[in-house]
Image (spheres, grey):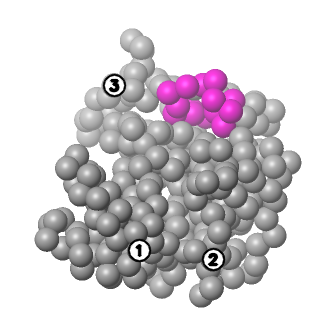
């Protein structure tokens, strides 16, 4: 097969591993910067151009689109979908996952348990918003934040009001969530590929922090997940329409809570900790799904 990896930086671990895995399985691979793509949209002659040339047909496209370029990156991915390439994660699924509020609403509609979450626009509603999620301590999150950036633990009501007011002053969209104290700064990242959880790690926040992201200095070890946690991870990925996802779960007194679903999970930390060749599993899934004559109906 001929496979395109959409990435701004081909030197990143995940991108290099995916390229290596695809080549090892006999595929041709191009790494394409989505911001350098330009397109024509036409009922009979749509195309994607890149650095002065029209790109050939690709059997499959692997999107590694950063959150900062979600709008244009998913537009490029949609163009490949229009041209008949199989996407490992559809453009519409990526945009669902990137909108934190929308993704939580969709998960809640399917009965997937979450940390109690609130959102309000008017400053007049701040007091009620804090009460709705059980008061302080609570977590304030930027809707557009990634890798733990824009996530603040407010330990008192006054601190919560100050953080919320500060973010609003920047015209930022925020979510307010209950703080799951019993999680003790830990979460479980379940890596879903297709219809399986292929790997899981428990991430522990560094001393003095509550964010377990490895990019923020957290540490990780192999996690033994329960049948319920596995079921929740698969259901969360399926609800958002993702074939590859990192599902972050908090272990609470009332059971597993889905904190977030990542549409472009990094592979470095989880591959190093577990020793599992996740990149190869992703390529094998593409081989099963990207059949000749594949055609995706573009969603809204």
The answer to whether residue 34 is magenta is: no
Q: Which mark is residue 38?
A: 3
Q: Which dot, 1 or 2, sits closer to the camera?
A: 1
Q: Which residue is mark 1?
A: 136
Q: Which mark is residue 182?
A: 2
Q: At which x and y percent is residue 274?
A: 83, 52
Give the CA separation, mark 3 to mark 1.
48 Å
Horizontal side of residue 103 vs 198, given as left or right? left
Q: Quadrant of the N terminus?
A: top right
Q: Which dot, 3 or 1, sits closer to the camera?
A: 1
Q: Secondary structure at mark 2?
A: helix
Q: Can residue 151 be seen at all in this image of the molecule?
A: yes
Q: Earlier in the sequence, mark 1 or mark 2?
A: 1
Q: Residue at x 34, y 36 (%)?
A: 72
* Residue stretch in magenta: 2-16
Q: Quadrant of the C terminus?
A: bottom left
Q: At which x and y percent is residue 228?
A: 69, 82
Quarter of the image where one finds residue 17: top right
Q: At which x and y percent is residue 273?
A: 81, 49
Q: Nearer the viewer, residue 45 or 192?
A: 192
Q: Earlier in the sequence, mark 2 or mark 3?
A: 3
């Amino acid at each position: 097969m001929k496979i395109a990896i959409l990435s701004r930086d081909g030197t990143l671990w995940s991108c290099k591993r995916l390229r290596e895995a695809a080549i090892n399985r006999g595929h041709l691979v191009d790494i394409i910067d989505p911001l350098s793509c330009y397109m024509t949209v036409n009922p009979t002659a749509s195309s994607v151009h890149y650095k002065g040339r029209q790109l050939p047909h690709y059997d499959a496209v692997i999107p590694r689109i950063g959150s900062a370029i979600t709008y244009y990156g998913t537009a490029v991915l949609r163009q490949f979908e229009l041209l008949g390439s199989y996407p490992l994660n559809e453009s519409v699924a990526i945009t669902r996952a990137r909108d934190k509020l929308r993704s939580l609403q969709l998960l809640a509609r399917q009965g997937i348990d979450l940390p109690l979450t609130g959102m309000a626009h008017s400053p007049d509603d701040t007091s009620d918003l804090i009460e709705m999620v059980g008061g302080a301590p609570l977590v304030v999150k930027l809707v557009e934040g990634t890798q733990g950036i824009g996530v603040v633990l407010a330990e008192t009501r006054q601190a919560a009001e100050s953080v919320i007011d500060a973010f609003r002053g920047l015209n930022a969209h925020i979510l307010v969530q209950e703080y799951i104290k019993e999680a003790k700064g830990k979460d479980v990242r379940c890596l879903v590929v297709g219809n399986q959880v292929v790997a899981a790690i428990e991430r522990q926040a560094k001393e003095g922090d509550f964010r377990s992201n490895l990019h923020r200095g957290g540490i990780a070890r192999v996690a033994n997940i329960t049948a319920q946690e596995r079921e929740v991870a698969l259901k969360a990925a399926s609800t958002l329409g993702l074939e590859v996802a990192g599902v972050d779960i908090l272990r609470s007194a009332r059971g597993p809570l889905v904190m977030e679903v990542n549409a472009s999970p990094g592979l470095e930390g989880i591959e190093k900790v577990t020793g599992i060749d996740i990149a190869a599993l992703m390529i094998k899934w593409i081989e099963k799904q990207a059949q000749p004559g594949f055609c995706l109906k573009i969603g809204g």
